[in-house]
Image: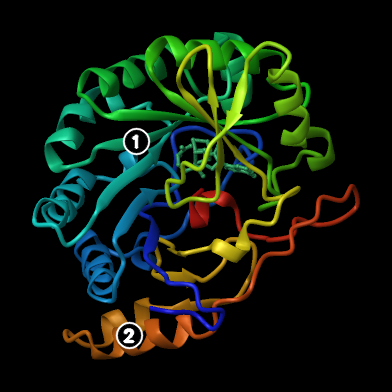
C-alpha cells in the first residue's frame, strides 16, 4: 500500500474497544458514553480485518483502545494474530495498555508471540496516579508492569507530560525506568475529544521537558526508530532510551507509515484529521474479501499529507473524537 505522497503503509493500529477501566483526565471525561455492542466488530471480524491489511503489506500491528485488555476474550485474537508473527507473515504484534489487567495476561502475551509492550504510566506517586487516572490504583499497575518484565516482554513506558500534573517527576521516572531496564517515551497532550479541562493548562512542550532532563542526564541523540513517530535519545548514565513524541511542536507526518482502525471498523488515515472510511459495511456485506480490499485501497489513496493540531484556549478540540476511539 503506497499513499499519494509515496509513503508505504506498513503499520496498523487497531483499537479493539472504546471502553476502559480508567478515566485519565487528558483522555476521557468522567461519564463517558460508550458505543453500543452491535456497532462493535466481533473478534472474528477484527481478525479478518487485520488479515486483510497483512495481505496488503502491513508488517506490524499494535492493539490499543480504550483498554485492549478489558475486551472479553481478547487473548484469543492475540493468539491468532500471534500465529502470523510465528510464521513470519507479521514482523511484530504489540499492544498499548494501562497495565491494570497485565498481571494475569503477561505470560499469555509472551507465549502468543508479543515481544514488546507499551505501558502508560504518568506518575509513581499513588495519590497523584489516582488523581490523573481518576479510578486507577498504582500498586495494581506496578504489579502488571513487573509481571510483564518477568515474562520477558520489553517494556516501554509512555508518560504524558502534564504541566503541574507530573512535571516534577520526569527525572524520577527516567531514573526508575533505568533501574528496571525500561525505555520511556514522553508524549505531549493532543487536543482530542472533550475532556472538561482546559488543554492549555495541561500542555507542556517536550522541548522544555528535554531541557530540564539535560540538567541531570547526558542525553545523546540516536537514530533508533520503532516505526512510530518518537525521536529517541540515549541516557548515558542508565543506558536506556528516552523517546519524545511531539505532535504539537514537531511535524512528524512526512515519515508516517501508519493507519488506524477503530473497533467499529472505521479507518482513519491520519490521527489528526476527520476523514475516514467505513470498513465495517464492506466487511459485513459478504463473506469474501473483495469489497473490503477495494475499500482499503480507496482509503489509502486519500491518506492526507499531515495533521493540523493547534492548542488554543478558546478552540474546540482539533479533533472531536477521543483518543480512546482511535487509540494512541
Ligand atoms: N488504555 C491504553 C493506555 O492507556 O495505554 C491504550 C489506549 S490510550 C488512548 C493510548 C495512549 O494515548 C496512552 O499512552 C495515553 O496516555 C495517550 N493519550 C490519551 N489521550 C491523550 C491525549 N489527549 N494526548 C496525548 N496522549 C494521549
Ligand atoms: Fe483509558 Fe488509556 Fe485513555 Fe487512560 S489513556 S482513560 S487508560 S484509554
- Left or right of 135, for residue 293: left
Residue 64: where, in percent of width, then height?
A: 40, 48
Residue 296: where, in percent of width, then height?
A: 38, 81
Badge 1 vs badge 2, beta-carbon distance below 8 Å: no
Residue 66: where, in percent of width, then height?
A: 45, 46
In space, the residues marked 1 and 2 are separated at their CA atoms by 31 Å
Is disc 2's CB within 8 Å of ligand 1? Answer: no
Classify 283 as above or below 245: below
Classify 107 as above or below 52: above
When asked about the image quadrant of residue 242, the answer is top right
At label 1, counting other C-alpha atoms closer than 10 Å, the crowd grade (few under 14, some 14-19, many 20 or more) is: many
Classify 56 as above or below 58: below
- Left or right of 163, for residue 106: left
At 84% from the left and 40% from the top, the residue drawn is 200
At 23% from the left and 46% from the top, the residue drawn is 74
Most foreground residue, 217 or 288: 217
Most foreground residue, 242 or 100: 242
At label 2, counting other C-alpha atoms closer than 10 Å, the crowd grade (few under 14, some 14-19, many 20 or more) is: some
Mark on residue 301? Answer: none
- Left or right of 230, for residue 284: left
Mark on residue 117? Answer: 1
Q: Secondary structure at mark 1?
A: strand
N-terminal-most mark, 1 or 2: 1
- The mark closer to the camera, 1 or 2, is 1
The N terminus lies in which quarter of the figure? bottom left
At 29% from the left and 61% from the top, the residue drawn is 59
Residue 255: where, in percent of width, then height?
A: 55, 62
When asked about the image quadrant of residue 283, the answer is bottom left
Identify residue for label 2: 282
At 59% from the left and 10% from the top, the residue drawn is 172
What coloring was used for the rendering? Answer: rainbow
Most foreground residue, 105 or 82: 82
Amino acid at each position: 500500500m503506497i499513499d499519494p505522497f509515496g509513503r508505504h503503509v506498513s503499520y496498523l493500529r487497531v483499537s479493539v474497544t472504546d471502553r476502559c477501566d480508567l478515566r485519565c483526565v487528558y483522555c476521557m471525561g468522567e461519564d463517558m458514553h460508550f458505543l453500543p455492542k452491535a456497532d462493535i466488530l466481533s473478534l472474528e471480524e477484527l481478525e479478518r480485518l487485520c488479515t486483510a491489511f497483512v495481505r496488503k503489506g502491513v508488517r506490524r500491528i499494535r492493539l490499543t483502545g480504550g483498554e485492549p485488555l478489558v475486551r472479553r476474550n481478547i487473548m484469543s485474537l492475540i493468539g491468532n494474530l500471534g500465529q502470523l508473527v510465528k510464521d513470519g507473515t507479521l514482523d511484530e504484534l504489540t499492544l498499548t495498555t494501562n497495565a491494570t489487567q497485565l498481571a494475569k495476561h503477561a505470560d499469555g502475551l509472551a507465549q502468543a508471540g508479543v515481544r514488546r509492550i507499551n505501558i502508560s504510566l504518568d506518575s509513581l506517586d499513588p495519590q497523584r496516579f489516582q488523581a490523573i487516572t481518576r479510578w486507577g490504583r498504582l500498586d495494581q499497575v506496578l504489579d502488571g508492569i513487573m509481571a510483564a518484565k518477568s515474562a520477558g516482554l520489553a517494556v516501554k513506558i509512555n508518560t504524558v507530560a502534564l504541566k503541574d500534573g507530573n512535571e516534577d517527576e520526569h527525572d524520577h521516572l527516567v531514573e526508575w525506568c533505568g533501574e528496571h531496564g525500561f525505555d520511556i517515551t514522553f508524549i505531549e497532550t493532543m487536543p482530542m475529544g472533550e475532556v472538561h479541562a482546559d488543554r492549555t493548562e495541561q500542555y507542556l512542550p517536550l522541548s522544555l521537558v528535554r531541557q530540564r532532563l539535560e540538567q541531570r542526564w547526558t542525553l545523546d541523540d540516536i537514530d533508533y526508530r520503532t516505526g512510530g513517530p518518537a525521536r529517541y535519545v540515549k541516557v548515558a548514565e542508565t543506558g536506556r532510551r528516552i523517546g519524545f513524541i511531539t505532535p504539537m511542536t514537531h511535524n512528524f507526518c512526512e515519515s508516517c507509515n501508519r493507519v488506524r482502525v477503530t473497533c467499529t471498523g472505521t479507518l482513519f488515515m491520519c490521527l489528526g484529521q476527520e476523514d475516514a472510511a467505513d470498513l465495517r459495511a464492506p466487511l459485513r456485506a459478504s463473506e469474501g474479501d473483495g469489497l473490503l480490499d477495494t475499500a482499503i485501497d480507496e482509503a489509502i489513496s486519500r491518506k492526507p499529507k499531515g495533521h493540523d493540531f493547534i492548542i488554543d484556549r478558546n478552540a474546540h478540540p482539533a479533533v472531536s473524537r477521543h483518543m480512546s476511539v482511535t487509540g494512541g
